[in-house]
Every structure is written in C-alpha cells, then in structure tokens.
Image (cartoon, grey):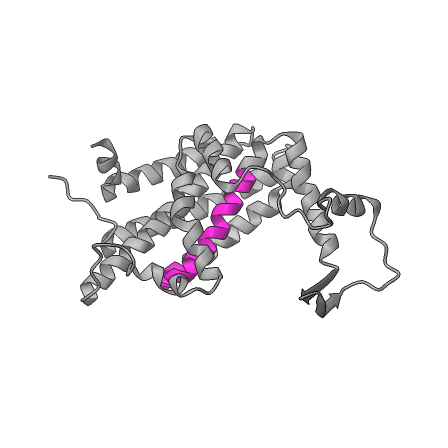
Amino acid sequence: MAQFKDMETEEGMLLWRECFKKHIEILHTHEINIRNCGFERPIKLYPLLAAIIEDSISLDILATHSRINQCYVISRALLERVINLSYLLYSSEEEYSSFVEYTKNKAARSLSRKIEIDGVEKVRLNFANENYQLSEDYSKAVERFTSPNGREIPRWTKLNIDKRADFLDKKSGKNLLLHVLMIYADASEALHGTLYGALFHLGIFVPGTYLDSAADQNKQKFNSLSFLYFMASSAIGTLLFCFREHGVDLSDAYEEADNIFNLAAEESGLAHEARQ
C-alpha cells in the first residue's frame, strides 16, 4: 500500500506549504506578463492582482507561525479577490462598468463619513472642505449606487459570491465553491469578534475531534494549515487559468502550477481518495 503524506501530519503540512510557496513564486514571476499583456481588463484590474500577491505572502507568514485564526481572515480576502478578478475577466461590459463605478462611489462617499445613533449624529469626519465639488463622473457613480429611499446600494453585482464561484468552477474545473464554504463564514465570525470566531480553528466544534493530548492538537493544527495551503494554491491556479483563457501568455505558468498542485495531491493521498 502506498505511503501518503497525510494532511494531518507535519510531513503532509510541509508538502502543501511547499506547494503554496511555489504558487506564490510562479504568480510573482509572471505578473509582468499580465501588466504587459496588451489586454484592457487584465491591465486595469492589475491592482487586484497586486493585492492577491500581498495576501498570499501575508498568509504564508501567518501560517508559518501557526496563526491559524488570522490565516482564515486573510484567506477570505485572498479568496474573494481571486473570485472577483477572475469573474470580471468574463463579465459583461455592464457588470464590469458597475465594478469600476462602485469604486468611484466608495471613493466619493469616503470623503465625508458620520455615525448616527437613534437619529443623532455622534461623530463625523470630513476629508474635503465645504467648497470641494465632486467631478461629474464621481457624482454619477454616487447616484448610481443610491437607492430610491436614499440609502447606499452596497454591491456592484447581483450575483453573490457563491454564484460567482460556481460560474468559475464551471469554466475552470476547479472547486472554489468548496473553499467559500470552508472559509467564508468562519472568517466572518472571526472578523465580527464572536466567541465562535475565536475558537472554531481549534476544531473544538467538530464532532469526533479529540484535543486531549499534544499529539491530537498537532494533528488538528497540521490539518488546518494543510487545508489553508491547499485552498490558496488551488485559488491561484484558478486565477492563472482565467488569465490564460483571456489571452495572457501564461500557458507555461499555468501548466507548471497545475503540475505542482497535482503532484502534491498525489503525494498527500487526496488524488487517491478522489479516485475511490
């Protein structure tokens, strides 16, 4: 019987860590291909790619020091940026325009902020003087994202993240939707400061998980870290696929990343389980 580097072991965790580090290196090495590709959307959306690279590096640092709770928070940012950037490469002109206009809307609204409690203004910040006038395009963006009752419309697309992930999975054959399921809600709880959000990463809410000994605790830690590395590597692979689909010269980069990921899946036993 084949000996696998199980995700619950240190050896398995280190396998997926190396996989993730190689994916970061590939993305960092080939980002110049995206900046210089000559296609409008990939170039204009480059700030999202830069943020994804930063998220990946931050996740690597946090995971190396076993800061698993914080890893979930940064993983959510990484995952959502990958989904948005990948989806926008396929989206209609109307939806792409909505994303750009949403940015202008948020920038304009950020110039004047306030908090009201029971109708009473408690605090306000103004970053522009009373004589400042928004340019026409920014004023139109604010109008576009204001509802009939005067409230801000908080989304640039009608498709929630689940539907965007599902759309990309159908295109790429990957499984972003699984990562959304495993990351998104728990990361939200961590961000919102709940007790569940402070404890979930320890595995104490998972039936059948035993944490009585140091060995049990290490098993849980290695499994969590392995999954986070696995998730991030897969997400980067999806992003490379989507760029390649839209004419960016990334065939070698995608194939290299895909081979590295598939090899890790074989050595860890995940591929074997999938074939059963």
Please report the residue visible at 29 percent of the width from the left and 39 percent of the height from the top: 263
Q: Is residue 251 left or right of residue 90?
A: left
Residue 111 in the image: x percent, y percent? 75, 59
Residue at (28, 40) in percent of width and height = 265
Residue 16's x, y, as percent?
Answer: 32, 49
Q: Is residue 75 magenta?
A: yes
Residue 140 within the magenta-colored segment of the rendering:
no
- Magenta highlight range: 62-86
Residue lying farthest to the bottom in this orientation: 122
Q: List x then y, in percent, for residue 157.
A: 60, 39
Task: Compare residues 153 and 107 and report the one nearer the observer.
Answer: 153
- Residue extending farthest to the right is 131
Q: Tell whether 27 sits left or right of 178.
A: right
Quarter of the image where the N terminus is located: top left
Quarter location, residue 258: top left
The answer to whether residue 40 of the structure is visible from this angle is no
Q: Is residue 177 visible?
A: yes
Q: Which quarter of the figure is the C terminus placed in?
A: top left
Residue at 52%, 49% in the rendered image: 52
Q: Nearer the viewer, residue 63 or 120?
A: 120
Which residue is at the front of the view, 133 or 74?
A: 133
